[in-house]
Image (spheres, helix red, strand yellow):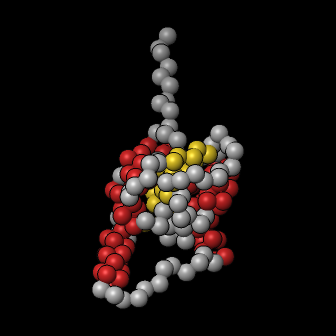
């Protein structure tokens, strides 16, 4: 009788959250719970997270970009990264991860170059003494847009994984 080969296990979708200044952690928890996804909350200091086997708090050592390095070294094609950090978004996009800002704006190969250029321009303006403002507080529309974008990202990554299997 021929031996039946089992399908190799599909990669699990994971969500990595650049958590230090992330305003949509509760929304991430809700979507992740709905889909049964593992969430990594990566921060430089202690942060309260819900008690769940599916949510892991990762506290990295103090230092510039240590949390970013931790996320970028692990995030791949079957993962979703939530960050407002443009350089981190660029690194994760290069790794094949799906990347969203807290406002639901997707970062991809087409948009990351312009986002990096805008960030660099704003940095140059600030260093030249120009007064710039930070981002406005999240509105209900931003949160709604984020929830829709995260839901869509999960569905797309699931399809990609299933198509590769």
Q: Is residue 113 left or right of residue 82?
A: left
Q: Residue at x 45, y 57 (%)?
A: 98
Q: Foreground: 110 or 140?
A: 140
Q: Nearer the viewer, residue 85 or 44?
A: 44
Is residue 161 something one can see in this rendering? yes
Residue 19 vs 33, above or below: the answer is: below
Q: Position of residue 79 (x, y in %)?
A: 48, 50
Q: Is residue 148 above or below residue 33?
A: below
Residue shown at 55% from the left, 64% from the top: 22
Residue 14: tell me if it is visible: no
In this rendering, the answer to whether 165 lies above or below 139 is above
Residue 148 vs residue 80: left or right?
right
Residue 31 position within the rendered picture, expressed as x and y whole percent measured from the top left: 65, 56
Q: x%, y% of residue 108?
A: 39, 64
Residue lying at the far bottom of the rendered structure? 130
Relative to residue 91, is residue 101 drawn left or right?
right
Q: Nearer the viewer, residue 64 or 27?
A: 64
- Residue drawn at x 69%, y 49% as measured from the top left: 50
Of all residues shown, which one is farthest toward the front?
62
How many numbered dots are placed on residues in this image?
A: 0
Which of 110/15 is in front? 15
Residue displayed at 63% across by 78% down: 139
Tell me the quarter of the picture where residue 137 sits: bottom right
Where residue 122 appears, x then y in whole percent? 36, 81
């Amino acid at each position: 009788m021929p031996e039946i080969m089992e399908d190799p296990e599909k990669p699990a979708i994971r969500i990595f959250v650049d958590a230090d200044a992330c305003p949509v952690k509760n929304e991430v928890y809700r979507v992740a719970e709905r889909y049964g996804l593992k969430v990594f909350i990566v921060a430089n200091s202690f942060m309260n997270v819900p008690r769940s086997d599916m949510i892991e708090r990762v506290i990295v050592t103090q230092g510039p970009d240590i949390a970013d390095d931790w996320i970028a070294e692990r995030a791949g094609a079957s993962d979703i990264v939530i960050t407002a950090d443009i350089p981190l978004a660029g690194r994760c996009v290069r790794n094949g991860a799906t990347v969203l800002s807290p406002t639901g704006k997707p970062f991809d190969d087409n948009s990351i170059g312009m986002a990096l250029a805008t960030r660099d321009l704003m940095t140059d303006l600030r260093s030249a003494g120009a007064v710039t403002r930070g981002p406005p507080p999240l509105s209900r529309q931003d949160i709604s847009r984020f929830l829709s974008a995260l839901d869509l990202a999960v569905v797309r990554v699931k399809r990609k994984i299933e198509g590769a299997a």
